[in-house]
Image: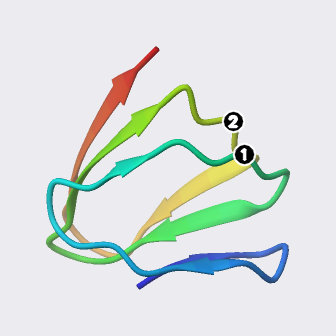
Amino acid sequence: MAKCTDGNAWDFANCDVLTSSTSGTVTIPNGASITLSDAAIGGIVCEGSATITLAG
């Protein structure tokens, strides 16, 4: 599960596309493969190794 310091949490699986916005920090779980598309976030923490594609 991706977690966010502003209290929000998102469930996502590999290859999901995140399009949300937050001023908090998003934590990406180890082994995830995700795309951030037009996402506005305060910061990213990766819990290990992940593939993060930026689009938009």
Q: Residues within 10 Å of mark 1 (few under 14, many from 20)?
A: few
Q: Quadrant of residue 28?
A: bottom left
Q: How far apart in space, not on screen, are marks 2 and 1 (Cα)? A: 4 Å
| Residue at 59 percent of width and 35 percent of height | 39
Mark number displayed over residue 11:
none
Identity of the amino acid at label 1? Ser
SS at badge 1 = loop
Residue 16 shown left or right of residue 41 in the figure: left
Q: Is residue 39 left or right of residue 18?
A: right
The location of residue 35, given as percent across then percent down, is 31, 41
Q: Can you give x and y, in whole percent of width and height, for residue 34 in the image?
A: 26, 51
Could you tell whether 49 is left or right of 47 in the image?
A: left
| Amino acid tagged 2 | Ala
Q: Is residue 44 above or below residue 54?
A: below
Q: Which residue is mark 1?
A: 21
- Discs 2, 1 touching: Cβ within 8 Å: yes
Question: Viewer-proximal residue, 41 or 30?
Answer: 41
